[in-house]
Amino acid sequence: MSQTPYKRKQGDFELRILSDGRLVMVAPDELLLEIAKAFDVNTSPTEQHLECNDAEAGNPGSQ
Amino acid sequence: MISTKHQKREPNAIDAAIESAAKHLTHCRLCPRNCGVNRTAGERGYCGLDDKAHCFREMLHWAEEAELTPSHQVYFTGCNLRCEYCTVSEWNQEPLTVAEMDLEGRVRAVERRQRQGAKNVNLLGGEPTVSLPGILVLLRRIRTSTQVVLNSNMYYNECVDGLLQGLVDVCLADLKCGNRRCAAALLDAEDYVDVAQRNLRMADRHTDLIVRHLVLPGHMECCTKPVLQWLAAELPRVKVSLRMNYVPPIEGAFAPKQYLTSHEAEAAVCLARDMGLHLIQ
């Protein structure tokens, strides 16, 4: 197994489960947002249980 | 409710802007990289793009600023920055792996998203202005039927602002860093702050400007504070949106490796309020 971190490729989804239980979806597309809705949690940017970070971070757009 | 301070451009003026933007691509100086490459002949500069626009995603998004939501986002590949914490970097590093924008398909998508409730069409990336000619062609088709939001990192040359005048209703603009050292390390653009500040002043004259600042963990004194101070001094009435959704990259030499804490988020909001800035959610 490679020791280097996996590098996200076009079309990949990236989900992170943090040690405090938060679920982070990185730059989710519409399908991933639908999945988030299925978790039945608030997906607003201020909701800390699930952070749906849009592409803007970085610009995307503007993160 | 978004007010409009701009005059909409006439169709023949849009054609002239498209022609002018296309000419820029033969010796590309759309952004401060000033690569000078002939994108129409297949040469590629820093952004890696050819002379076409390439869209990798479109979606109805519910987490933009409240006054813009729901927003029809249209994502373009290619960027003139290399933010270490970019969450869509895979689309910008190889922008030509995505097919050329299907204009008719995009126009139909705008109509479909409007029926689904979209308040606007929101052009983002990557950095949309590096695909300026393609964007202008799209705007020529949809301009009269929807509100147009340009979601930009604000790293472009002055000519871009002129070509977009009368075509953009809302400029959803980043101001990412507060100093040259952080801009060089995090964005690979030492001159970013100066360029973005100039462009914010220009955009404020002809668009409804919303300035976004992503609060970076550990960058309160060097970035968030000077960004807010500059806004308070230079654009005191502008709408300011503090974003708290930083995602640390898996790899990165300079980007913070931790998530933003609630304490840091609260401190940024308090700072902005103390300066009298017009914060929006």
Image (tube, grey):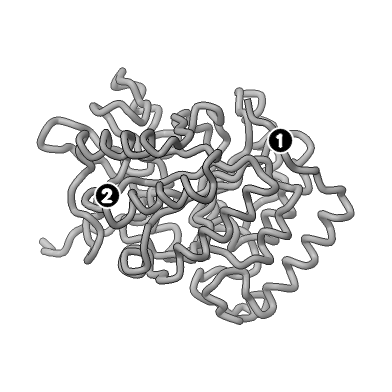
User: From what the image shows, is residue A42 above or below residue B184?
Assistant: above
Residue at the disc numbered 2 = B220
Q: Which of B10 and B237 is in front in this view?
A: B237
Residue B105 percent location from the top left of the image:
67, 44
- Mark closest to the chain's N terminus, 2 or 1: 1
Type of amino acid under label 2: Met
User: From what the image shows, is residue B1 above or below residue B235?
Assistant: above
User: From what the image shows, is residue A44 above or below residue B274?
Assistant: above
User: From what the image shows, is residue B165 above or below residue A45?
Assistant: below
Badge 1 marks a residue whose secondary structure is loop
- For this orientation, the residue located farthest to the top is A40
* Residue A29 visible here: yes
Badge 2 marks a residue whose secondary structure is helix
Type of amino acid under label 1: Thr
In the image: residue B189, left or right of residue A26: right
| Mark 1 Cα-neighbour bin, 10 Å: few <14, some 14–19, many ≥20 | some
Residue B4 tag number: 1
Residue A40 percent location from the top left of the image:
31, 18
Look at 62% across and 74% down and name the residue there. Answer: B29
User: Is there a contact, CB below 8 Å, between mark 2 and mark 1?
Assistant: no
Q: Which of B27 and B274 is in front in this view?
A: B274
Q: Which of B103 and B146 is in front in this view?
A: B146
Quadrant of the frame with the C terminus of chain B = top left
Q: Label 2 lies in what chain?
A: B
In the image: residue B248, left or right of residue B238: left
